[in-house]
Each structure stands twice: as structure tokens, then as C-alpha cells.
Image: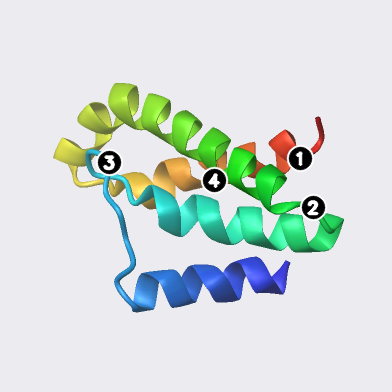
Amino acid sequence: MGGAFANGVMFHSRGQEDTHGTMHIGTTVIPTALAVAEWKKSSGKDLLAAIIAGYEVAAAIGKELTPLTTPRGFRASPIYGSLVRQSPPGSFSG
């Protein structure tokens, strides 16, 4: 899974960060989905479905939880990213 880490670093360092509330979803979801899709030799259609699943989970979590943590000084992406990161691999499982 070194590819997922490398892609995550690249996305973040280049500033390719979309924002939903206070969470940078793409930086968390896309590198994981790319790494799992490559490992499983999945189709582009499956990759896109995994990315969409990750965005949906992140948006749901972010909508409910970031108002509770961000005002206290906690960054949403590191806190909830570990949860969101699980949705793309799960969607490849069927």
C-alpha cells in the first residue's frame, strides 16, 4: 500500500484538495481507491464507484461530526480520514 501513501502525499503537497465543510475528501479517498483498484486489477467503472462511495461516506461523516470537532481545534481530515479510507476498499469487495 505504499502507492496509496505516495499518492496521498502527492495530492496534499500539490494542493489538490477539494473541500466539503472542513474535510479534504479527495486527498483521503482517491489515493486509497487507486491503490486498491490497481492491486485488484479493477475496471475504471469499479474505481469510479469506489471513489463515489468514499465521497458519500465522507460527506455523511463530515456533515454530522466536523461541527463538533473543528471548533475545538481538531482537523477533520486526519480524524475522520481513517474511517473514510475504509469505504473504497470495501466497495471493491462487492
From what the image shows, is residue 86 above or below residue 35?
above
Image point (43%, 59%), residue name: 27
From what the image shows, is residue 26 above or below residue 8?
above
- Neighbour class for label 1 at 10 Å: few (<14), some, many (≥20)? some
In front of the other: label 3 or label 4? 3
- Residue type pointed to by label 1: Phe
Say which residue label 2 marks.
Answer: 42
In primary-sequence order, the first of circles 1 and 4 is: 4
- Residue type pointed to by label 4: Ser
The span from disc 4 to disc 2 (Cα, nearest Å) is 23 Å
- Which quadrant: the C terminus? top right
| Side of 30 where 27 appears, left or right | left
Say which residue label 4 marks.
Answer: 82
The span from disc 1 to disc 3 (Cα, nearest Å) is 24 Å
Say which residue label 1 marks.
Answer: 92
Image coords of residue 92 (percent x, y) = 76, 40
